[in-house]
Image (spheres, rainbow, N blue to C red):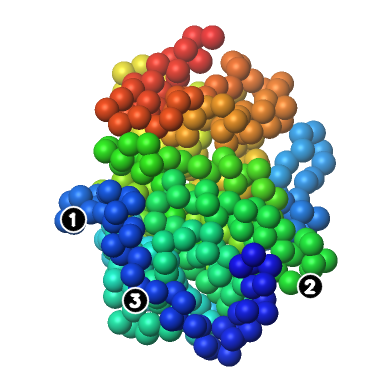
């Protein structure tokens, strides 16, 4: 209802009148009451044009079919991007050592500074959010651009769809990915299809939905899920998950500037635990491109988010103890995903293992294994396999047995090598 009347209702947004009285700031108490997991301390907070997706992958012929790289909407937005220059030392961009939530905050600040039509809103974001990713942004950019909303995910995304349709760049926060499902209709039936159903006249390009996801050690059923596979099945969206602070900043800025609605999943256990050298100033990483983070010759390991670190540890263990050389790939963009990089790697190694926290059945890993089995069939030395979360609701005390931890990956690597 909110979305269908969104363009007319949000005409006032285009004139700068946001109607903040409707978006009351009383969400904090209600959010805490529902979640039961609001951190009390720093430590506790530890597709294609035909489908309505601009810049989707292309297909080329010649032996196996390959999915090309996703084109970004950056060229169309270059005028305002030039306004924010990078910090450069010679030809090397200066860096600083920061954690993941600080990298997210840095990217959001850059987005707000470079485009006056960028908005940030969601539950508790005006005072930093439960994970502090938006700290200080209200003070820098004002309450008309950084503001709280009621506890209503479908309303948050519905409002964002309308704002994006009239030219704004809303960056909304769903406080936990587990609570994104009330907004599923607005995301899948409205945002993802806006360009397609209007014949390209309108779109929700510029809409970015940030949400913390994944296991955190004590989250239980409703603060631990990884729902990326639900949205991989929705043409018109892009779906992204970084594996560290550097990737978080670069991919988030690319997502905000992309001419398609993007869901940006943030592995919450890494907000403070992951630290890296991150470029200062403007910095982007391309969407639709995977990254080879460890080269190898015997088997290809593919993951995203937190699981990339687990795969690297498993690769180091089998290299030291068994002399097995693993190539580790960080997928980074889940939709559209980079077929070429994985297919080229598997053609070299002859083996594939995909790992993710989400349940195995119908997960992203199933799509990757299916596609690569076809693309690289004549090069395979063993059947591609998956090491994933269990097909159960996310447990609390049984979390260590649910998650695809290092020992399970090591065991599967050895089984593949002995096939």
In the image, farthest residue toward the bottom: 15
**What is the spatial separation of the Cα atoms under label 3 and label 2, in whole angstroms?**
33 Å
Q: Is residue 300 left or right of residue 323?
A: right
Say which of 50 and 293 sits in front. Answer: 50
Neighbour tally class for label 3: few under 14, some 14-19, many 20 plus, Cα within 10 Å: many
Element on which disc 2 rests: loop
Q: Position of residue 298 (x, y in %)?
A: 50, 23
Residue 295: horizontal and vertical position, in percent?
47, 36
Residue 348 seen: no
> Which circle, 1 or 3, is nearer the viewer?
1
Residue at point 72%, 27% (across, down) = 374
At which x and y percent is residue 10?
Answer: 61, 79
Question: In the image, residue 271 lies at what x, y percent?
Answer: 31, 53
Residue 40 numbered mark, or none: 1
The residue labelled by disc 2 is 201
Q: How dense is the environment of label 2, judged by Cα within 10 Å: few (below 14), some, or many (20 and up)?
A: few
Q: Which residue is rendered at x = 37% and y = 84% of the image?
A: 142
Q: Judging from the image, what secondary structure is the residue with disc 3 in? A: helix
Residue highlighted by disc 3: 137
Q: Are marks 3 and 2 in contact (CB under 8 Å)?
A: no
């Amino acid at each position: 209802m909110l979305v269908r009347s969104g363009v007319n209702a949000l005409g006032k947004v285009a004139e700068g009148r946001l109607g903040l009285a409707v978006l009351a700031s009383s969400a904090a108490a209600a959010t805490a009451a529902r979640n039961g997991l609001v951190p009390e301390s720093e430590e506790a907070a530890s597709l294609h044009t035909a489908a309505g997706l601009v810049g989707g992958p292309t297909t080329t012929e010649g032996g196996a079919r390959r999915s090309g790289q996703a084109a970004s909407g950056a060229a169309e937005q270059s005028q305002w991007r030039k306004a924010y220059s990078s910090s450069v030392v010679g030809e090397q961009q200066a860096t600083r050592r920061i954690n993941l939530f600080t990298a997210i905050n840095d990217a959001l600040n850059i987005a707000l500074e470079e485009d006056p039509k960028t908005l940030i809103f969601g539950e508790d974001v005006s005072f930093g959010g439960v994970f502090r990713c938006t700290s200080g942004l209200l003070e820098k950019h004002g309450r008309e651009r950084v503001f709280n909303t009621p506890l209503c995910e479908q309303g948050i995304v519905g409002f964002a769809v309308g704002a994006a349709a009239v030219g704004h760049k809303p960056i909304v926060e769903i406080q936990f990915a587990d609570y994104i499902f009330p907004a599923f209709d607005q995301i899948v039936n409205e945002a993802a299809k806006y360009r397609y159903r209007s014949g390209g006249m309108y779109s929700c390009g510029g809409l970015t939905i940030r949400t913390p996801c994944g296991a955190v050690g004590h989250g239980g059923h409703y603060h631990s899920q990884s729902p990326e596979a639900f949205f991989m099945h929705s043409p018109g969206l892009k779906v992204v998950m970084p594996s560290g602070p550097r990737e978080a900043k670069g991919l988030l800025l690319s997502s905000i500037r992309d001419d398609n609605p993007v869901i940006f999943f943030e592995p919450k256990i890494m907000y403070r635990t992951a630290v890296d050298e991150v470029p200062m100033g403007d910095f982007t990483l391309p969407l639709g491109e995977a990254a080879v983070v460890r080269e190898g010759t015997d088997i290809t390991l593919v993951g995203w988010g937190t699981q990339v670190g687990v795969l690297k540890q498993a690769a180091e263990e089998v290299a030291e103890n068994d002399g097995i050389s693993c190539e580790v790939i960080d997928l980074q963009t889940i939709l559209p995903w980079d077929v070429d990089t994985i297919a080229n790697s598997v053609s070299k190694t002859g083996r594939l293992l995909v790992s993710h926290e989400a349940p195995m059945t119908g997960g992203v890993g199933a799509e990757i294994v299916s596609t690569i089995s076809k693309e690289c069939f004549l090069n395979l030395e063993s059947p591609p396999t998956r090491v994933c979360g269990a097909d159960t609701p996310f447990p609390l005390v049984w979390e260590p047995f649910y998650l695809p931890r290092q020992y399970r990956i090591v065991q599967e690597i050895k089984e593949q090598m002995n096939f």
